[in-house]
Image (spheres, rainbow, N blue to C red):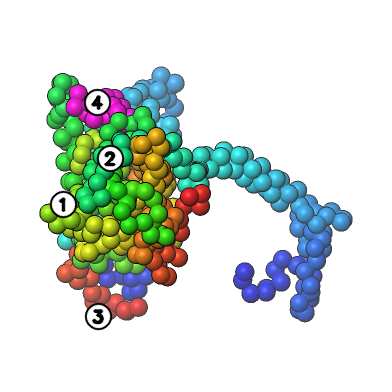
Amino acid sequence: MPPKLSNPLKKNVSDLPKPPMPPLPPSLRPNPKPGPKEEVTVGEAAAAGGTSVVAWIDERTSGSGFLRGFLFRKVPKGTNWWYTLGSATMFAFIAQAFTGVFLAMYYTPSPTEAYESMRHVNNDVFLGEFVHGMHKWGATVMTVLVFVHMARTFVFGAYKYPRELNWIVGVLLLMMTMMMGFTGYLLPFDQRSFWATVVGVNLNGTGPIIGPYLADFLRAGSDFTATTLSRFYAIHMMLVPGLIGALIGAHLYLVAKLGTSAPPWKKADLPTSDEKRV
Amino acid sequence: MPPETDTKTSSADAAKPPKSKFTADRGWPGSFEGETVTRRSFMTGVALTAGGVASMMFALPALGFALGPLFEKTNHISLLDVGPVDEFPADTFVPQVVTTTAGIGEVGKTLVYIRKNDNPTPEQSWPFVAISNRCAHLGCPVRYIEAAKSFICPCHGGTYNFEGEVTGGPPVRPLDRFETYVQNGRVMLGARFSVNSQLERVPTRDPGEHVDGVWQVLYPPRPTT
């Protein structure tokens, strides 16, 4: 403890110990403070300025400053593997988006051709069954990870002040993930897909007052028609992924802004006797 | 709004002066005699209004496009021919596959169980009883079991009797029916309709929606049905 600080709230930033420089590649390390001015030629100045592509981009975006603050944040003591679940969920989402784009290249959202197009992917296309399988099982992985991440947040009490808003954003992301699962389930268009969706849409219809309208909205009418499948397809691959991407951005911003919380078994460093508790 | 501090008024009077509507009286920079709305706030309003109008010009049609089917009239295709009159006895059901939505393959088909109506009542005076196989719980396909004279749903165990009334399981109302007509000795199917627990005709509703008592208020039928 530095003894000259009597009130921990009255620290000056310059008094704080300087954090060590993160392990950055040389081109992204901040330049040393300029010393006394010397006469340099234009050529020398250009050579000193650096001409690498990374430096060129960095000079125009200040990206390295942002990345230093975003990637090399301080984390509390006790941070452990449970804190990786959010990143794992995001990785699952990226994998879903990536494989989904390639499945969309083969898929035909038409009630008479959808099943045939997926049969073609599974049986004929090189690695088609594998990519389809990754998308299918990845959906389950993502849903499980969302719930484990949520349970970790709840059990660690990480939803408490000032992180309540991030919990709310997370709940919205949970709902979006559920919507992805629901709309994606129909797309292979086999017997299981179809009847599960019939039951799922009718479940929506059992909600009082707005339920019947919700079911009609999902089906695009009173009956399962040609529009229903393409509607599910558009929701699955355009509407909800866009919303998820935007909400992940908000979620990550709040994580970086507020920092993560220490695990509940970690006690705060108590002030010593000569420090006043506030 | 912070408490009244008089910082915005130029007069140093301790008494609360009524706020003037003239910008000049408030001592705003650039104000002039008789001005009530500054150019800045006017232009802000114009920009917001123009932006709002422009946004609504695409947002409202797009929203209507997406929500339109909710209010579209369900167009029942013309009567569906399901076979000659003498094919359907009164003591058992004959299943018939009919296409209710054309052009979408298997998905547009549904199964209807048909028998002769040997006991017409004021509520059900149709010449034939045509019962939909769409379960009134969540829409799974029910199957008629001759030995039990019952309809049984494979999903969650809903059972219905010979009239399609619920005898067990989770369904909330009897099985839907279809209008039946006889034309040139052939049985024709009309529109689908739902029935309440008294087998009275009510507007068509989706599976899982109640049609009896106060419950029916919570499940409004489609506006155009």
Marks 1 and 3: CB-CB under 8 Å? no
Disc 2 target residue: B86
The verdict on a common chain for dots 2 and 4 is no
Task: Point out residue A14 in the picture as x, y percentages from the top left corner.
Answer: 36, 57
Front position among marks 2 and 4: 2
Determine which of the numbered discs, if any, sits on residue A117 in the image. Answer: 4
Alpha carbon separation for disc pair 3 and 2: 101 Å
The verdict on a common chain for dots 3 and 4 is yes
Alpha carbon separation for disc pair 3 and 4: 73 Å
Residue segment shown in magenta: A101-121
Alpha carbon separation for disc pair 1 and 3: 83 Å
Q: Residue B123 falls in which quadrant of the image?
A: bottom left
Disc 3 target residue: A273
Q: What is the three-letter code of the residue carrying label 1? A: Ile
- Decide: few, some or many residues near mark 2? Use Cα within 10 Å; few <14, some 14-19, many ≥20: few
> Is B174 rendered above or below residue B45?
below
The verdict on a common chain for dots 1 and 3 is no
Q: Secondary structure at mark 1?
A: strand
Q: What is the three-letter code of the residue carrying label 3? A: Ser
Q: Secondary structure at mark 3?
A: loop
Chain of the residue under label 3:
A
Q: Secondary structure at mark 4?
A: helix
Q: Secondary structure at mark 2?
A: helix
Q: What is the three-letter code of the residue carrying label 4? A: Ser
Task: Point out residue A75 in the picture as x, y percentages from the top left corner.
Answer: 24, 56
Given residues B153 and A86, the one toward you in this image is B153
Disc 1 target residue: B145
Chain of the residue under label 2:
B
Asked whether residue B64 is in view, the answer is: yes
Marks 2 and 4: CB-CB under 8 Å? no
Alpha carbon separation for disc pair 1 and 4: 36 Å
